[in-house]
Image: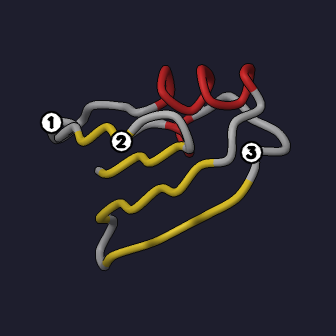
Amino acid sequence: MYIKTITMDKKDTIPVGGTFYPYVMELFESKQKVGILYEDSGVTRANGLIESVSSGTACNG
């Protein structure tokens, strides 16, 4: 997983079965623009502001 914000670049590898939910919540609460690149049966990229966060299994690894 790769997370990029205006104020920092942070690269972390989340283990299989892990979650990047804490990172998402931190960025959501601080209203920072983000760029997320993650592998989930193919590479997925998302950029912009996180408008909402829902709880549940969709937020896990």
Residue positioned 52% across, 57% down in the render: 35
Q: Position of residue 30 (x, y in %)?
A: 72, 22
Helix, strand or loop for disc 1: loop
Quadrant in which the C terminus appears = top left
* Residue position for label 3: 50
* Residue position for label 1: 15
Mark 3 or mark 2: whose residue is earlier in sequence: 2
Q: Is residue 35 left or right of residue 15?
A: right
Query: How far is the residue under mark 1 from the one under mark 2?
Result: 19 Å
In front: 28, or 33? 33
* Residue position for label 2: 9
Residue positioned 33% across, 65% down in the render: 40
Helix, strand or loop for disc 2: strand
What's under tag 2, amino acid-wise?
Answer: Asp
Query: How far is the residue under mark 3 from the one under mark 2?
Result: 17 Å
Give the residue furthest to the bottom.
42
Q: Is residue 61 left or right of residue 27?
A: left
Give the residue furthest to the right.
51
Q: Position of residue 19 (x, y in %)?
A: 37, 31
To which quarter of the image does residue 27 belong? top right
Q: Is residue 9 left or right of residue 17?
A: right
In front: 31, or 54? 31
Helix, strand or loop for disc 3: loop
Q: Is residue 11 above or below residue 44?
A: above
Label 3 vs label 2, nearer the camera: 2
What's under tag 3, amino acid-wise?
Answer: Ile
Label 1 vs label 2, nearer the camera: 2
Q: Position of residue 28 (x, y in %)?
A: 71, 30
